[in-house]
């Protein structure tokens, strides 16, 4: 094992000693590329997935610049989620142990008083979510005049969550002479615009795995109608050997809806979304890690920062809007050399995204057929017989045998007793109904229609619900939102906000057309009153918007 400081590009010996003790043997690719530049004080844009060692890549140079004798805040790391803030703060604290660096995580849901006490004692590094940090700045508890280093971690997610205004306000309190690092799993146009405003002649480092989706991950998809997705998912949960599953959906509202649907069908699941308090989130993750629950239903944002290596299955209940996000999701299974399974549920109109994913990953996903009702019933019976044979071999049924003997003495046939016992043992199967699946009507999706869908998507519109113009859309009307592309929003923001604040299922929304300063959304006419009644509540990030009938 090489532990010489030169291996780590001139890092402080105390840092090298600490990371060596933590099990670091040599720099990862992102560390090899980033450390020399960052230790020279350069600004940097880093593109790397979770699990590549990027926290150490920005954390070690950050700690090297800390002046131990100064108690002021000297470094700032902004993250999109509480979980990630905690994870990064713990990592930096462990790396800086021998330097005596004080690190504090600040995030919503945590007691203000606890944070006030820590800040009064003196903190050199703050890791936090933009909203809570801005609150502390506005209340005068945090000053950033001495900050030398700023890190924007998971910048793409912070932008998608609407934090751009908070980020800009925070950076306005930081000296312009700072070193700024931006890390992101995806480098979108908005991320590039952010870096152009706040980074000085940055170097760009992009670490893309040679194989975007690991060789240990089995990937396949199933083509189903939108309204059959829950039925399809429950059939797969019946047949798959699931140790732990992470199911991805698009919106916070959908996490609760799907978790409830799965639980009522005999597959206990819990949602993981931004509405959970920090205590509730920790409790959910603890139950998941301990195996008390096997299924989590999450959004991409809520799943950021999860430090769980042994997820056996990832399900894309809803496909992501970006192939890079697909890679990020799938990469949560098949870690540490284990075998993993990634399953996607596609509707016919999702096939254009499937092609984008396959082109991006250079990997062709296999289409599979859903298990039939007969196959599931046979599987259930085989599992029951396997369990019975196991108990017979163990010979540990003495009390149960006494009950059988008593029933036989009472005049019952042993075969009837066994059949009745099996009937009772299978009662739970009734809680897991096998819903029918409607066959896909391939002829309804001809090439001309698919080209039309692609042109609609290129123009910035989408159809989360029914397609406009179909016979089922005759009762749809348009509503107008006073927010548009100039506000830095996307279709996914509109869908998530309307669904969350109105309580209306996102699948009921029709075509969405983003204009420069407003947005048009088709909705069922009978829901207009309910949607308008929530005016005053709708917001994307810190931007409040209103609806009106067009």
Image (cartoon, rainbow, N blue to C red):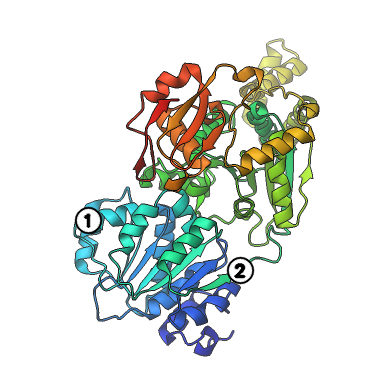
Disc 2 and disc 1 in contact, CB within 8 angstroms: no
Q: Residue 516 at x, y = what percent? A: 47, 43
Q: Is residue 513 left or right of residue 369?
A: left
Q: Is residue 167 above or below residue 254?
A: below
Q: Nearer the viewer, residue 49 or 487?
A: 487
In depth, the one of 430 and 42 nearer the eye is: 42
Residue at 23% across / 66% down in the picture?
Answer: 143
Compared to residue 221, the image places residue 217 above or below, namely below
Residue at the front extreme of this rendering: 516
Q: Point out the image quarter for the C terminus.
A: top left
Image spot of residue 376 (x, y percent):
75, 29
Q: Residue at x 54, y 45 (%)?
A: 291
Task: Report the Cα–Cα distance between label 2 and label 1.
Answer: 37 Å
Judging by the rendered image, the residue that carries numbered circle 2 is 207
Which of the two discs, 2 and 1, labels the residue nearer the N terminus? 1
Residue at which label 1 appears: 138
Would residue 290 be seen by someone viewing this image from the given angle?
no
| Residue 433 rendering spot, x and y as whole percentages | 66, 23
Residue 158 appears in view: yes
Q: Residues within 10 Å of mark 2 (few under 14, many from 20)?
A: some
């Amino acid at each position: 094992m090489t532990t010489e400081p030169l291996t780590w590009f001139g890092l402080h010996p105390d840092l090298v000693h600490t990371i060596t003790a933590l099990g670091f043997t040599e720099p990862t690719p992102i560390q090899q590329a980033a450390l020399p530049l960052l230790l020279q004080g350069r600004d940097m844009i880093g593109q790397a997935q979770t699990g590549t060692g990027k926290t150490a890549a920005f954390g070690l140079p950050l700690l090297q610049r800390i002046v131990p004798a100064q108690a002021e805040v000297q470094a700032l790391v902004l993250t999109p989620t509480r979980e990630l803030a905690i994870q990064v703060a713990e990592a930096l604290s462990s790396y800086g142990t021998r330097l005596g660096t004080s690190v504090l995580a600040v995030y919503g849901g945590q007691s203000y008083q606890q944070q006030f006490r820590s800040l009064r004692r003196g903190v050199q590094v703050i890791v936090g979510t933009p909203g809570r940090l801005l609150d502390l700045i506005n209340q005068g508890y945090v000053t950033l005049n001495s900050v030398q280093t700023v890190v924007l971690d998971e910048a793409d997610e912070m932008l998608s969550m609407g934090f751009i205004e908070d980020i800009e306000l925070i950076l306005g309190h930081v000296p312009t002479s700072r070193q700024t690092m931006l890390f992101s799993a995806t480098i979108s146009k908005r991320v590039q615009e952010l870096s152009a405003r706040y980074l000085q002649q940055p170097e760009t480092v992009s670490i893309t795995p040679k194989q975007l989706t690991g060789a240990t991950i089995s990937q396949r998809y199933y083509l189903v109608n939108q309204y059959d997705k829950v039925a399809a998912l429950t059939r797969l949960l019946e047949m798959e050997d699931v140790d732990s599953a992470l199911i991805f959906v698009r919106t916070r509202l959908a996490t609760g809806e799907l978790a409830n649907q799965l639980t009522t069908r005999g597959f206990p699941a819990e949602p993981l979304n931004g509405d959970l308090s920090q205590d509730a989130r920790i409790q959910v993750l603890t139950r998941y890690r301990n195996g008390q629950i096997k299924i989590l239903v999450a959004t991409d944002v809520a799943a950021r920062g999860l430090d769980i290596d042994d997820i056996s299955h990832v399900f894309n209940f809803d496909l992501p809007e970006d192939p890079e996000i697909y890679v990020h999701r799938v990469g949560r299974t098949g870690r540490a050399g284990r075998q993993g399974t990634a399953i996607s549920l596609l509707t016919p109109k999702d096939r254009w995204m499937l092609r984008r994913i396959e082109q991006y990953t250079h990997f062709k996903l296999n289409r599979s057929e859903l298990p039939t009702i007969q196959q599931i019933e046979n599987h259930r019976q085989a599992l029951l017989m396997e369990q019975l044979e196991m108990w017979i071999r163990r010979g540990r049924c003495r009390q149960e045998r006494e009950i059988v003997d008593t029933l036989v003495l009472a005049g019952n046939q042993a075969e009837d007793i066994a059949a009745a016992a099996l009937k009772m043992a299978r009662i739970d199967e009734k809680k897991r109904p096998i819903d029918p699946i409607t066959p896909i009507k391939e002829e309804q999706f001809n090439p001309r229609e698919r080209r039309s869908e692609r042109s609609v998507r290129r123009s910035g519109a989408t159809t989360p619900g029914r397609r406009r113009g179909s016979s089922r859309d005759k009762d749809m009307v348009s509503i107008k939102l006073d927010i548009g592309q100039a506000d830095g929003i996307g279709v996914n923001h509109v869908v998530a906000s309307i669904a969350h604040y109105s309580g209306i299922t996102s699948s009921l929304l029709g075509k969405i057309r983003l204009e420069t300063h407003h947005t048009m959304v088709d909705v069922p006419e009978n829901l207009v009153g309910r949607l308008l009644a929530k005016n005053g509540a709708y917001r994307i990030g810190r931007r409040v918007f209103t609806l009106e009938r067009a």
